[in-house]
Amino acid sequence: MPDCYIALGGNQGNVRETFDLALQRLDAHPRISVVKTSHWIETTPVGSQTDDVFLNGAAQLLVELSPEELLRELQSVEAELGRVRHVRWGARTLDLDLLLYDQLVLEADELVIPHPACWYRRFVLDPLVEIAPDVIHPVKQISISALQQRLLKRPFNFSIAGLPRDESTALIEQLQSRFPEVEFSCWESSEGHADPTLIAWLGADDAETRFEDLPLLPRIDASASRHDTEQNIWLLQSALDFR
């Protein structure tokens, strides 16, 4: 049976009770078994859509469902327990995200596995490392524990790639004012290319660097947020510890 990991999140209502009900609902399914759960941790919300503290956790499942069937079941449990999808990063009663499905790598319209952001979000990795420290991320090819430890290193180095130099400098100045404790660099200007914690590729048409040219481990395709500084702020917030 495939070994799967999900993330749980919520900040509306009695979230602990909602988590318990969600796991009971999943475990009652004839083709799903809940094997292990993490502790629930409180995290500061990312973004500006809600001020209410989140509760986050992770669970290990054994399933006899396809990835698509499991996704539909997770969405069904969300809906049953009051989840309404309105705004990204907004308040919610329950969020169930499929993080890993064995070592499967899948890119489809409705589902991407592994979850594309699970490897750099502290609110996902901190509970996940409790129950799956030695599980290998099938794309990054290192363990969940090693992924989390990379984000704990200080100073945290965030490199911007795939922008013209002047645009990169302007973005770094904006980010530096919000995150004075973070070291920022322009990938194209860095000599020797030290090992950044994360590299955000912004994907300008005339970029010197292609996404495929960047080292596999720290690279993030952030091209969708090239003209949205807030999205890059939220990306950084999710990678740093704001508890």
Image (cartoon, rainbow, N blue to C red):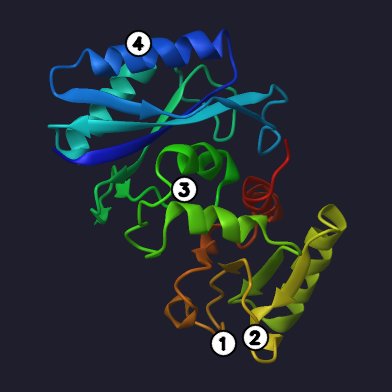
Q: Of label 3 and label 2, which has the lower sequence position?
A: 3
In the rendered image, residue 175, in percent from the top left (x then y), is placed at 78, 59
Q: Residue at x 18, y 32 (%)?
A: 63
Measured in 3D between alpha carbons, the distance from the residue under mark 3 to the one under mark 2, in whole angstroms, is: 26 Å
Farthest bottom residue?
Answer: 191
Residue, disc 3: 118
Foreground tag (3 vs 4): 3
In the rendered image, residue 215, in percent from the top left (x then y), is placed at 48, 77
Residue, disc 2: 188
Q: Of label 1 and label 2, which has the lower sequence position?
A: 2
In the rendered image, residue 71, in percent from the top left (x then y), is placed at 27, 32
Label 4 close to label 2 by CB (< 8 Å): no
| Quadrant of res 186 | bottom right
In the rendered structure, the answer to whether residue 57 lies left or right of residue 24 reads right
Front position in the image: 118 or 5 = 5
Crowding at mark 1 (Cα within 10 Å: few <14, some 14-19, many 20+): some
Residue, disc 1: 208
